[in-house]
Image (cartoon, grey):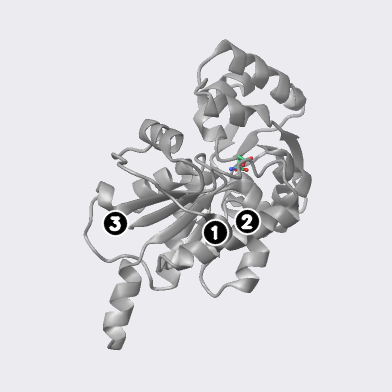
Amino acid sequence: MADNEKQNSMNMAPIGVFDSGRGGLTVAREILRQLPNEKIVYFGDTARVPYGSKSKETVIRYSRQIVRFLLTKNVKAIVIACNTASAFALEELKREFDIPIIGVIRPGAKAAVENTVTKRIGVIGTEGTIRSAIYSEVIHEYDREAIVLGKACPLFVSLVEEGWLHDTVTDEVAGRYLSEFKNRDIDTLIMGCTHYPLLRSTIMKTMGEDVFLVNPAYETAASLKRLLDKNGIASKADLIPKPEMYDYYVSDAPGKFIEFARSIMPIEIETAAQINIEEY
Ligand code: DGL
């Protein structure tokens, strides 16, 4: 292949996006909105979800298998949509694989630092993400004086999976978890888990409108755009999103995944293929 043909096929290659399950579709959705001419191959590890309560070693092993799988789809870059996998596995994967890989933590942390005035930032996420203290670590790279308060909110994932986005039970759970931040003067809260942006209105109601909510999914799509441009691998085609530009793979039966995807993706999803991720 001539050099410019090779470059062209690289530009047209899809972005690999992966998550522990379906929540990462909140990131795929932002990529679709902000980079409408990019193709996506999405993998949701629906057989092994949740990652939030698993050990670092296990999450790294799972993530490594997923990257190997995505490479068979000739992706040009990889986005780790899962906060827990970003927290535990990003650095390791970057060392092991020769492909641009980004996670959701740094873009979210950076946006929080840019927004805060009080320099007091709250972070909510899975047990794994909060235990890793990764948001705090990255925030301190940008601002050593910032104070970071973390709180694991594991039930939020189940409430979203159950579809209880606007429900008195969800209000009650949010009230309990977020009371941790009462009188702590935080002006910025990072929704550090794939599912939490879907609870935005409940979280906002509980925290009050003065607290700015950072959606790492949104920030990551913006950061992906810069990464593609910097590496000269952005799609130059004049495409508009069509179902055939998005391929979905899962590790368990796809029924529930498709149902969830239909409720949040702005374009139709027809199928998701089930694969055996343990083979990779
Ligand atoms: N995707 C996970 C995250 O963003 C949440 C679900 C899970 O625990 O696997 O951390």
Frontmost of labels 3 and 1 is 1
Left or right: where 81 falls relative to 128: left
Question: Taking the image as drawn, is residue 248 in sight?
Answer: yes
Reading the image, the residue beneath label 3 is 37
The crowd level at tag 3 (other Cα within 10 Å; few <14, some 14-19, many 20+) is many
The picture quadrant where one finds residue 123 is: top right
- Residue at screen point 33% across, 58% down: 38
Q: Mark 1: which secondary structure?
A: helix
**Crowding at label 2, few (<14), some or many (≥20) Cα neighbours within 10 Å?**
some
Q: Residue 62 has which mark?
A: 2
- How many numbered discs? 3
Which quarter is ligand 1 in?
top right
For marks 3 and 1, the one nearer the N-term is: 3
The answer to whether residue 122 shows anywhere in this view is no
Residue under the image location 49 percent in, 23 percent down: 163
State the SS at label 3.
Answer: loop
Q: Quadrant of residue 235?
A: bottom left
Lateral position of residue 218 relative to residue 258, left or right: right
Q: Which residue is mark 1?
A: 66
N-terminal of the two: label 2 or label 3? 3
